Image (tube, rainbow, N blue to C red):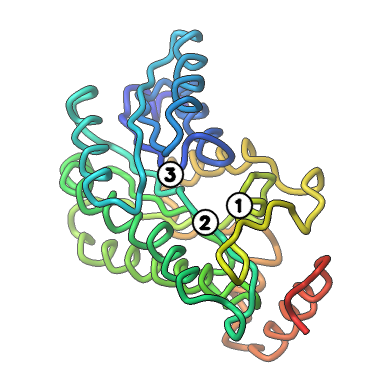
Amino acid sequence: MKKTFLGKVVIVTGASSGIGEATAREFAAHGSKVMLAARTEEKLKSIVAEIRSKNQIADYSVTDVTSESDCKQLVEKCVNVFGTVDILINNAGLSMRATFMDVDLDVIRRLMDVNFWGTVYCTKYALPYLVKNKGSLVGVSSVAGFHGLPARTGYSASKFAMHGLLETIRIENLKKGLHVMIIAPGFTATEIRKKALLADGSPQGTTPRREEKLMAPEYVARFILKGIKKKKRNKILTWQGRITALFQRILPEQIDAAYYYAMCKEPDSPLK
């Protein structure tokens, strides 16, 4: 594995915590040169300092992925510091918890700005380098990008849009050696549920799930690297997700019902 990533230049968005932080650390540990991107400079500074203390290579760029100019600046800084871009991990993400009937439409706009447009902007400016290097373009998604999840309307919509974008880019560059992967972890122990937006746009603040029982970010990070090494197309990390992708066209009503009742069981579920 280390030979695969030694010297590769990697951009990771949403790298100040959770899956993004774990992925940046994993790449650095495998000899990559990592550019971390997120909005919080203090966290980025701290993580980069820890990586460098291990004689590993990292830098950061303060980036709001909803800003096209920030994303352009991120790629430009990476090229200026490290010379190119070999791998782009579009990980920055935002979730929600409300039915479409109740949600303020600004919540859906916000999710599209982060989850979809953030991927669009970063990919647009990194793509020439990725194609030139026959590199890897990765979108960190969810089973919500394969099948709609109740009370996650904007989240599912943004992930479906991300899938369509990345799949089309894969086809457009079919003869150029570009690797495109969509990875769908299960529920992972991160801050995403606490920061998830409620119907009025306020952050949820708490999590409806037992975080200690969820997938670890480090586990997801290892599978991201393994998926890139093996040039995977789609990597779904849970059996529930794999069943969904396999049976959604064969048993769609049963899949709908399974997700409805699963989400109903969450504490304070918005589903009636």
Q: Considering depth in this image, is 159 or 37 the residue closer to the camera?
A: 37
Residue beneath label 3, please?
228
Question: Is the Cβ of the residue at disc 3 closer than 8 Å to that at disc 2?
Answer: no
Q: Considering depth in this image, is 25 or 264 the residue closer to the camera?
A: 264
**Under tag 3, what secondary structure?**
helix
Left or right side of 199 for 211: right
Neighbours of disc 3 within 10 Å: few (<14), some (14-19), many (20+): many
Q: Nearer the viewer, mark 3 or mark 2?
A: 2
Left or right side of 85 for 90: right
The tag earlier along the polypeptide, 1 or 3, is 1
Amino acid type at mark 1: Lys
Q: Which mark is residue 94?
A: 2
Residue name at image x 45 percent, y 71 percent: 106
Amino acid type at mark 2: Leu
The tag earlier along the polypeptide, 1 or 2, is 2
Residue beneath label 1, please?
195
